[in-house]
Amino acid sequence: EIFATCAEHDLASICNSPLAMGLLSGKFDNTSRLPNDDVRGSGHSWVAYFADGQPRPEFLDKLTAVREILTSDGRTLVQGALAWLWARSPQAVPIPGFKTVQQVEENARAMQHGPLTAEQVREIEELLAQPA
């Protein structure tokens, strides 16, 4: 576990792509299709959340399962995803991508909400552990 190692050695954990290449933004569904020139549509094996330019159904299902918890307390889905990382480790330094000023502002406003509670993290872990 990266977070445990970082905590043990008092190191930061730089979290690149904390929004799962946009999947945790909520803008994709099972009808979404990305072009081949988008890295998520390129077919690279390291693109875990997308296959052939489409969000993988198992990840969409997991997102649906945890959406209500992530968006609790007035958070957007993006803010909830960042809050989940902060709740798992105070060493987590997420670096979410953005294309617009609105996205930058949404990401920054996540700090106003702070991390999810321990109970919320436990609920999410239970939901994610359930078989699809």
Image (tube, rainbow, N blue to C red):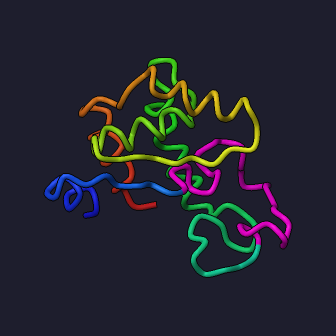
Q: Looking at the image, is 8 positioned above or below residue 68?
A: below
Identified at 66% across, 80% down, the residue is 44
Q: Position of residue 16 (x, y in %)?
A: 50, 57
Q: Residue 115: horizontal and vertical position, in percent?
A: 35, 31
Query: Residue 75, percent across and down?
Result: 52, 24
Relative to 66, residue 18 above or below = below
Residue range of the region highlighted in magenta in the rendering: 17-41
Please tell me which residue is depicted at 61% across the width and 71% down the height of the picture: 47
Q: Is residue 14 above or below residue 46?
A: above
Report the residue at 40% width, 46% height from top.
93
Q: Does residue 51 appear to the left or right of 35 in the view shown?
A: left
Q: Is residue 100 left or right of residue 65?
A: right
Image height check: is 58 above or below 68? below
Q: Quadrant of residue 105?
A: top right
Q: Is residue 24 magenta?
A: yes
The N terminus lies in quadrant: bottom left
